[in-house]
Image: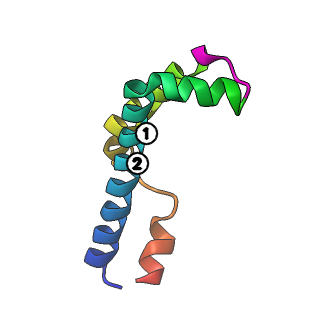
Amino acid sequence: MSGKSVKIAYWAATGLVALVYLGRATFYITAHDMVAGMYEGVLTFPTYIIWPPAILKIVSFLTQNRVREKKSPYDDLLNRAA
């Protein structure tokens, strides 16, 4: 794989993960009653624990591209595979 196709694959995967995070956070917020029922009934967790994961998922969605600006420890591995 060329360097360009590795970057395209990386950004496609990163974008999909970011969309999953955003979709899950949206679900936590918009369907709070249903999520609260699952947390209480199935998982036996208190309902106040729903908000921190929702907020963290939104923050991770917003900051996911900024993390990539740092050098990845896997850059050498990706370059050798190319």
Query: Which of these two is toward me, 70 or 44?
Result: 44
Q: Magenta segment, which residues?
A: 44-48
- Which residue is at 46% across, 82% downward? 81
Q: Amino acid at mark 2?
A: Val
Indicate whether 47 appears above or below 26: above
For the residue carrying disc 2, how many other residues have a C-alpha within 10 Å: few (<14), some (14-19), or many (20+)? Answer: some
Q: Are marks 2 and 1 in contact (CB under 8 Å)?
A: yes
The outermost residue toward the top is 48
Using a 10 Å C-alpha cutoff, classify the residue at mark 1 as few (fewer than 14 neighbours), some (14 to 19) or many (20 or more): some
Image quadrant holding the N terminus, namely bottom left
Q: Please tell me the numbered disc located at residue 24.
A: 1
Q: Nearer the viewer, residue 14 or 7?
A: 14
Q: Quadrant of the C terminus?
A: bottom left
Q: Secondary structure at mark 2?
A: helix
Residue 29 image offset from top left, x and y in percent: 40, 25
On screen, residue 12 versus residue 36, left or right, reads left
Looking at the rendered structure, the kind of residue marked 1 is Arg
Residue where numbered disc 2 is placed: 20
Residue occupying image coordinates x 38% and y 62% = 13
| Percent of width and height locating residue 28 | 45, 29
Residue 11 location, quadrant: bottom left
Left or right, 64 with respect to 38, comes to: left
Task: Return the residue found at the far right.
Answer: 44
User: Helix, strand, or loop for circle 1?
Assistant: helix
Give the image quarter of residue 62: top left
